[in-house]
Image (cartoon, rainbow, N blue to C red):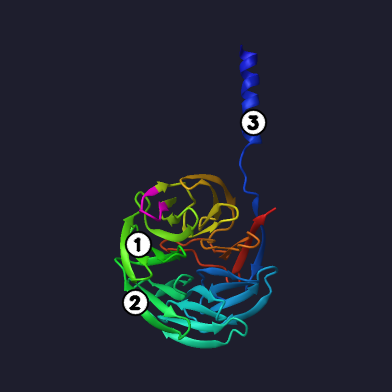
Amino acid sequence: MKKISIICLLFFIGKTNLFAQSSGYRLTDSFHIAGPGGWDYIAVNKNKLYVSHGTLVNIIDKNNGDSLGEVPNTTGVHGIAFDNELNKGYTSNGRLNNVTVFDLNTNKILAQIPTGINPDAIFYEDYSKKIITCNGRSNSLSIIDPVTDRVVDTIALSGKPETAVSDGAGKVFVNIENRSAISEIDMKSLKVENTWSIAPGKSPSGLSIDRKTKRLFAGCENKMLVVLNAENGSVVSTPAIGEGCDGTAFDPALNYVYSSNGEGTLTIIKEISKDKYDVIENVPTKRGARTLAVDPLTHIVYLPTANFKPAVSGERRPPMVPGSFQVLVVKKK
């Protein structure tokens, strides 16, 4: 009986290893970018990466990291958005309380648009064809018409907006970080229709969406990805993620949800069905790699970070090593 039990156990272990899941993603390269300053969001547009970097946006080739230019004078820049029909790019400048408009071909500055206080996340909303900023200190959204490059409306919120996404059919969803909630906005009326608690999730930061299944993916401070039904606000799943998430993304071709974690991991979650989600693996990245962009064409994940000096007691974050700013390249091997 003992021999049979041992044989069965070995067979079970073998089968477990045989069917162990792997995303195939691995850290394969890093693109080093000169200059001081912190960072926040990164964005992919066609063959270029746009990387927020302190007082400017670095533009690099997504294939090899070669410098292709920069957008200057964007102090406190958080995010970058694009209106490819009008050939314009937009940066949210948190310390200047404005948005910079630039030409996507020449990088020439076209306009500076005043917004709410501390514009953070920014994105192109394809239903209304507007640019939207999340104003972190004025608890509002600025709605920008890219034809006139003017703020045409402001939507008041119940708390601090962190990130927003669109379902492409007239609804925008916003993480309300300090209330651990998500607000639903109707882009026809420009009114908040619902604000849903995401408990047990806390302090949502990154937000992404599967438009097909109508599911929202909110990366939370308490190492949890909250999957929310975008039609009624119910929490349908809470898979575990790494610590320090500041960005999530969804790849509809692979049905993968990604969470970039400042601890130095990339959590990859498989959407099995609209209400079932399995963690595939936590791919090692580097400390500080807390935001991300996924190329929808190549499925490559890009994450900005730097090297850090030893932490000093009392400091919120350890100082970065000068000249070590970089973009990590994580792709399937």
Q: Earlier in the sequence, mark 3 or mark 1?
A: 3
State the mark number for residue 154.
Answer: 2
Look at discs 2 and 3 and give the one toward the viewer.
Answer: 2
Left or right of residue 184: residue 311: right
Q: Quarter holding the N terminus? A: top right
Magenta segment boundaries in residue numbering: 228-235
Q: Position of residue 133 (x, y in %)?
A: 42, 74
Give amino acid for label 3: Lys
Crowd band around label 1 with a 10 angstrom C-alpha radius: few (<14), some (14–19), many (20+): many
- Determine the main secondary structure of the stretch shown in magenta: loop
Give amino acid for label 2: Thr
Q: Are marks 1 and 2 in contact (CB under 8 Å)?
A: no
Q: Where is residue 181, by image quadrant?
A: bottom left
Q: Secondary structure at mark 3?
A: helix
Q: Residue at x 51, y 74 (%)?
A: 81
Give amino acid for label 1: Ser
Q: Earlier in the sequence, mark 1 or mark 2?
A: 2
Residue 178 shows in this picture: yes
Look at discs 3 and 1 and give the one toward the viewer.
Answer: 1
Question: In 3D space, how far apart are the residues under numbered discs 2 and 3 (Cα atoms)?
Answer: 57 Å
**Residue to which mark 1 is pinned:** 183
**Residue to which mark 3 is pinned:** 15
Q: Secondary structure at mark 1?
A: strand
